[in-house]
Image (cartoon, rainbow, N blue to C red):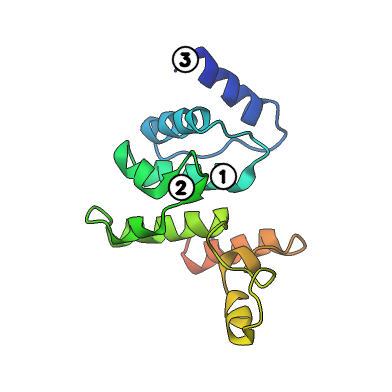
């Protein structure tokens, strides 16, 4: 990895008191940092960092650009209809889009339609916007998928 990428790693992780981010493999890690640099994303832009992290897990090259327009800073929802998208990729893309939230409605930005506002309360961005219990939400997910013992 180049010097700029090393500086990004230092800025994002080494200076932080938080634990290091887990990566699937070195390819995931290198592609993630390359896209962070390419898209000029600050570590403070956590919505974009989360988006890039998940897209870097499944996308390489053109497929990444099919999911995220770095110039417009928007997600490309039609990417879900692409032939290369498997069911696992679709789930990952949907979560990435929800964490990014630009094209995902929230209760605060839906006008008038009560049914849509109520439905939006079930979107992950609204569910996990609960600092008091968030860590326990993630623990419940780990329990549900058998990643921890009780």
Compared across the picture, whether 57 is left or right of 105 comes to: left
Disc 1 versus disc 3: nearer the observer: 1
Name the spot of residue 78 as percent of width and height, x first: 35, 59
Disc 2 versus disc 1: nearer the observer: 1
The residue labelled by disc 3 is 2
Residue positioned 37% across, 42% down in the render: 64
Disc 2 or 3, which lies upstream in sequence? 3
Label 1 Cα neighbours within 10 Å, binned few <14 / some 14-19 / many ≥20: many
Residue positioned 64% across, 67% down in the render: 126
Q: Do the residues labelled 1 and 3 touch (CB within 8 Å)?
A: no
Image quadrant occupied by the N terminus: top left
Q: Which of 145 and 125 is in front in this view?
A: 125
Name the spot of residue 59 as percent of width and height, x first: 35, 43
Q: Which residue lies most toward the bottom here?
A: 115
Label 2 Cα neighbours within 10 Å, binned few <14 / some 14-19 / many ≥20: many
Q: Indicate the secondary structure of the residue bearing disc 2.
A: helix
Residue 99 — which label? none
Residue at mark 1 to residue at mark 3: CA–CA distance: 22 Å
Q: Which residue lies most toward the top here?
A: 3
The residue labelled by disc 1 is 48
Residue at mark 2 to residue at mark 1: CA–CA distance: 10 Å
Label 3 Cα neighbours within 10 Å, binned few <14 / some 14-19 / many ≥20: few
Name the spot of residue 33 as percent of width and height, x first: 49, 30
Disc 2 or 1, which lies upstream in sequence? 1
**Where 69 sits versus 134, above or below?**
above
Residue 54 — which label? 2
């Amino acid at each position: 990895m180049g010097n700029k990428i090393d500086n990004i790693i230092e800025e994002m992780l080494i200076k932080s008191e938080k634990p290091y981010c887990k990566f699937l493999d070195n390819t995931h890690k290198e592609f993630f940092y390359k896209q962070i640099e390419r898209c000029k994303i600050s570590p403070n832009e956590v919505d974009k960092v989360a988006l890039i992290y998940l897209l870097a897990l499944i996308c390489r090259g053109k497929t990444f650009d099919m999911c995220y327009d770095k110039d417009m800073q928007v997600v490309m929802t039609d990417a879900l209809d692409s032939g290369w998208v498997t069911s696992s990729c679709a789930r990952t893309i949907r979560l990435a889009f929800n964490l990014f939230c630009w094209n995902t409605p929230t209760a605060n930005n839906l006008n008038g339609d009560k049914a849509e506002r109520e439905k939006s309360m079930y979107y992950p961005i609204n569910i996990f916007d609960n600092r008091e219990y968030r860590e326990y939400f993630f623990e419940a997910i780990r329990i549900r998928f058998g990643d921890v013992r009780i």
